[in-house]
Image (cartoon, grey):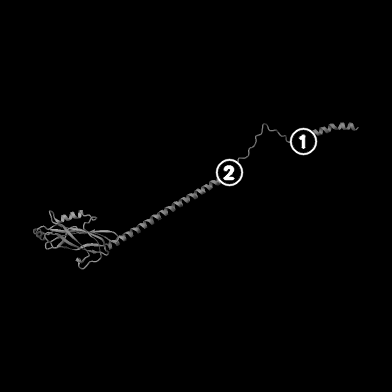
Amino acid sequence: MDLGDSKNKNPRSESSDRASDQRSGHSKPQVTPASGPTEPHSPQSPNGHKVPCKAQRDWHDYAMLIVQAVGVAFLIGYTTFAALQWCEMRRTNNLSTQALSNAKKQFERDQRPYVWPAEIVPFPLRVGEQIRANVFLVKYGKTPALREKYGGKVLVYVGKGTLFQADEFFENFDENNIVGGSEIIIPPGIPPDPRKSQAFSTAKSDGIIATAAGLNEIEKTEGSFAVVGVVVYFDAAGNKYRTDFCTMHLPGGLMAWCSRHNEIH
């Protein structure tokens, strides 16, 4: 009967189903649930990607440091070279300036004027008059003597010797206060006759010859009076020069140079 057969068949079907379920259960791995809560995974830190960039930046910094060091060294070297070159140029300029100055001084020294009394002629001595003498000046050298000024006098032997009086005269002489002097230009050249010189002056004594006995003593005594003077003059460049002279009377009316105070400065 169909009902009986279907009933009889069900137990076997169920058992076969259970067996297949068991086999399928053995073939599929069992998933064991994780015990406890699961920890979330944080994303990877981005620092790991910066390491190559930092290394590249360090290399760039080192390279820039080297370039800057080379630049500083080059700048120091260039500055040192420029300073040495400037010092050498300045030294050369100083030497050139000094050479030009020396050449100018040498030229002025070579061209400078020299003024000197070519002849000193006393006037005839007379009682009641001062002792006087004409001083004729001439110029040696290649250029004129400009702004020539003369100051002098006749020193008469009174109390102490005329040479000692001459010492005091030159020691106390003031170039800037020439009393009774003149200011002229002495041209180059020496005239054949010094007494025809355009530059001459007359020196005088402070006192007069009082008596005939005094006149006789002056005429016969060596060094009874002296003619002294100072000549101040300039050249074209404005350099100042000075001539000192001193002559003493000799018996017979002659004049001789003193032992000192005959100089050109």
CA gap, disc 2 to disc 1?
A: 53 Å
Residue 243 shows in this picture = no
Q: Which residue is mark 2?
A: 50
What residue sits right under mark 1 in the picture? 24
Quadrant hosting residue 257: bottom left
Given the current orientation, which residue lies at the most extreme bottom position?
192
Where in the figure is residue 168, as x and y percent of width and height?
18, 54
Residue 17 appears anywhere in the view: yes
Number of marks drawn: 2
- In which quarter of the view is residue 101 placed? bottom left
Q: With respect to residue 181, does 53 lie above or below?
A: above
Task: Report which quarter residue 129 is drawn in.
Answer: bottom left
Percent position (x, y) of residue 85? 40, 55
Lower sequence index among marks 2 and 1: 1
Instruction: Bin the neighbour count of mark 2 within 10 Å (Cα to Cα): few under 14, some 14-19, many 20 and up.
Output: few
* Left or right position of 16 against 167: right
**Which residue type carries mark 1?**
Ser
- Say which mark, if any, is on residue 252: none
- The front one of 207 and 51 is 207
Q: Residue at x 45, y 52 (%)?
A: 75
The secondary structure type at the circle numbered 1 is helix
At label 2, which amino acid type do we have?
A: Lys
Q: Secondary structure at mark 2?
A: helix
Q: Residue furthest left?
A: 213
Nearest the eye: 179 or 147 = 179
Q: Residue at x 18, y 55 (%)?
A: 169
